[in-house]
Image: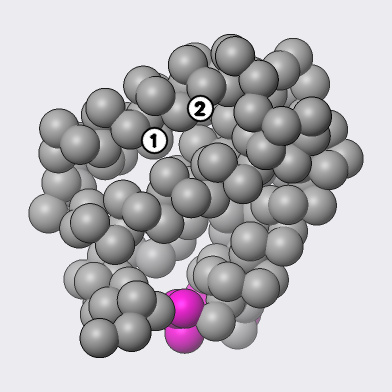
Amino acid sequence: MDCLLIFAQNLATMDFQEFFIEMGRLLYATAMMDGKVQKDEVNKVKQIVNDQLTEMVESYDAFGTSNAFYLEFEFERLNDIEARIRDAFDSFISYANENKADFTPEIKKLVMVSCEKVANAFNGIEDNERVLLNKLRRHLDSL
């Protein structure tokens, strides 16, 4: 079965907005691990949303905006206020813990691949980003 179809079926029970807001927090934490959100990382987040997530999920808010854009909105909001990495990362981890049943292998793969793409967008994956990715992978594996 197509990975996109499996993803869409799994998300049928999820709160789309909440999932993407939390993904925005996680990708922000990933981008900030090198001390600053770089333009290449911002562009990668936009690319992930536009090229992948809006195609995977046909869900919209009351204004007709794809719920996938909530990832980008949250990422930009946290960047604007220079939110703490730990707070953003911990928020995603709490969300994952509260929604374990939704974190199928396909969802876990989407989360990891998205984080790796953002971490790799500027100067490759640096040591501190690798630490965060490893911590995330261990946590997802434990769900």
Question: Which residue is at 39% across, 65% downward?
Answer: 16
Q: Dot 1 lies on which element?
A: helix
Question: Depth check: 70 or 104 in front?
Answer: 104
Q: Mark 2 points at which residue?
A: 88
Question: Which residue is at 45% across, 78% downward?
Answer: 57
Q: In which quarter of the image is residue 14?
A: bottom left
Residue 86's place in the image compared with 97, above or below, is above
The dot on residue 92 is 1
Residue at the extreme front of the image, as rendered: 124
Q: Is residue 21 visible?
A: no
Circles 2, 1 touching at the beta carbon (< 8 Å): yes
Q: In the rendered structure, which amino acid carries the disc numbered 2?
A: Ala
Q: Is residue 36 left or right of residue 28?
A: right
Q: Is residue 74 left or right of residue 13?
A: right
**Residues in magenta, as a range:** 56-63
Question: Which residue is at 20% across, 58% downward?
Answer: 104
Q: In the rendered structure, which amino acid carries the disc numbered 1?
A: Phe
**In the rendering, at what x and y percent does residue 73 appear?**
67, 52
Question: Which residue is at 79% across, 34% downward?
Answer: 122
- What secondary structure predominates along the stretch shown in magenta? loop
**In the rendering, at what x and y percent does residue 101 appear?**
12, 54
**In the rendering, at what x and y percent does residue 51 appear?**
66, 73
Image quarter where the C terminus lies is top left
Q: In this view, does 62 lie to the left or right of 134?
A: right
Question: Depth check: 71 or 41 in front?
Answer: 41
**In the rendering, at what x and y percent does residue 65 appear?**
62, 77
Q: What whole-number distance in Å separates the C-alpha atoms at marks 2 and 1?
A: 7 Å
Q: Residues within 10 Å of mark 2 (few under 14, many from 20)?
A: many
